[in-house]
Image: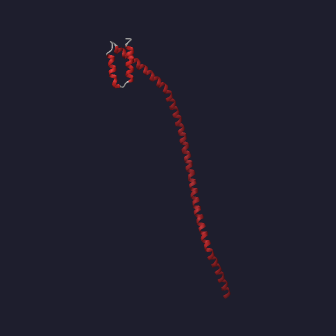
Amino acid sequence: MADSLPEHDRILQEIESTDTACVGPTLRSVYDDQPNAHQRFMEKLDTCIRNHDREIEKMCNFHHQGFVDAITELLKVRADAEKLKVQVTDTNRRLQDAGKEVIAQTEEIIRCRVQQRNITTVVEKLQLCLPVLEMYSKLKEQMNVKRLLYD
């Protein structure tokens, strides 16, 4: 019985470390061994399974607190994200409103500039006409003077 325990450890290690295709011959060696070897192997296997279960439980317990902390942090981030979303939405609305006012003022400036350009064009055209108007005024004055002389 003492000889079979190290052999069982070797068999369990071989089962855990190989792929499933090679497990058959390894398990067959359990049945080819001494009388009651199968029962002793099953006890050893149960012990090994309990050890693995404890390791899994320890690992889960260890990571559980990290998981809880991560969820708590995520909930805080979600609340902060909601606040940020409200702020961004409010800022966007205010920018849109300010943009509408800027657009209206820009359109008014464009209308004023067009009007200013039209006035400048009219002044230039009138300045071109001034000599003609001055000549007309002189002609009319001379005609009035001549009428007075002939009347």
Residue 104 vs 43, above or below: the answer is below
Instruction: Classify 119 as above or below 44.
Output: below
- Residue drawn at x 32%, y 19% as measured from the top left: 28
The quarter of the displayed image where residue 30 is located:
top left
Residue found at the far top of this picture: 1
Using the rendered image of the protein, determine whether residue 59 is visible from the camera's viewpoint.
yes
The residue nearer to you, when weighing 148 against 7, is 7
Q: Quadrant of residue 19?
A: top left
Quadrant assignment for the C terminus: bottom right
Is 29 located above or below residue 75 in the figure? above
**Location of residue 102 in the rendering, given as x and y in whole percent from the top left corner:** 58, 54
Q: Residue at x 52, y 30 (%)?
A: 69
**Residue 64 percent location from the top left of the image:** 49, 27
Measured as percent of width and height from the top left, residue 89 is found at: 54, 45
Left or right: residue 14 versus residue 59 is left
Given the current orientation, which residue lies at the most extreme bottom position? 150
Q: How many marks?
A: 0
Quadrant where the N terminus is found in the figure: top left
Image x and y of residue 27, in percent: 33, 20
Report the colour scheme: secondary structure
45 vs 140, left or right, is left
Q: Residue at x 55, y 44 (%)?
A: 88
* Residue 151 can be seen, yes or no: no
